[in-house]
Amino acid sequence: PAPWNETMRPGDNKWTMTIWGRDLETGEAKFGYQKTPHDEWDYAGINFMMLSEQKDKEGKLRKLLTHPDRNGIVYTLDRTDGTLVSADKIDDTVNVFKKVDLKSGLPVRDPEYGTRMDHLAKDVCPSAMGYHNQGLDSYDPT
């Protein structure tokens, strides 16, 4: 969102950094999942999404959407209803978030790496370029 100076735009900046699901017949929104509320690093969430069908722990086949994001988190959602299935750091160098709470879907931020006017953040990972930019990924079901 703009402006990049996060103090100029308080709140979650709803619908930015959001994965949308729409009904193919009507075009109506089925769900929206905001990955980085109040995105202060310009991660933008522009990466592509992989669609797959996988069995869950109970053996039920689920239609999934997996999105490796510039914010350093790989998200997997049930693409039929937007339920967050998993949200894992790409690796341990990601420090802007401690984790993503799977119940609320919200990232747990580490204030040490926030971009505030009264704070000099160092060694922020991912940087504004993002951990995973616009390259393509693949999925190996084995």
Image: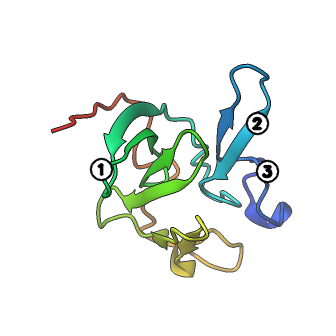
Q: Residue furthest left?
A: 142
Q: Is residue 22 above or below residue 74?
A: above
Residue 99 position within the rendered picture, expressed as x and y whole percent measured from the top left: 45, 71
Q: In this image, 60 relative to 10: left or right?
A: left
Of labels 3 and 1, the one closer to you: 1
Q: What residue did someone put label 1 on?
A: 59
Residue 9 position within the rendered picture, expressed as x and y whole percent measured from the top left: 83, 60
Q: In this image, 132 relative to 14: left or right?
A: left
User: Which amino acid type corresponds to the residue marked 2 in the rendered image?
Assistant: Ala
User: Which amino acid type corresponds to the residue marked 3 in the rendered image?
Assistant: Pro
> If you read the primary sequence from the N terminus, does the residue marked by circle 3 or circle 1 appear first?
3
Q: Nearer the viewer, residue 67 or 7?
A: 67
Q: Secondary structure at mark 1?
A: loop
Graded by Cα atoms within 10 Å as few (under 14), some (14 to 19) or many (20 or more), the crowding at tag 1 reads few
Is any part of residue 92 visible from this angle?
yes
- The circle on residue 29 is 2
Q: Is residue 41 above or below residue 2?
A: below
Is any part of residue 126 visible from this angle?
no
Q: What residue did someone put label 3 on?
A: 3
Q: Between marks 3 and 1, how big is the CA–CA gap? A: 46 Å
Name the image quarter holding residue 81.
top right
Q: Residue at x 42, y 62 (%)?
A: 125
Residue 70 position within the rendered picture, expressed as x and y whole percent measured from the top left: 48, 47
Q: In this image, 112 relative to 5: left or right?
A: left
User: Which amino acid type corresponds to the residue marked 1 in the rendered image?
Assistant: Gly
Of labels 2 and 1, the one closer to you: 1
Q: Between marks 3 and 2, how big is the CA–CA gap? A: 27 Å
Q: Nearer the viewer, residue 125 or 90?
A: 90
Q: Secondary structure at mark 2?
A: strand
* Residues at marks 2 and 1 touching, judged by CB atoms closer than 8 Å: no
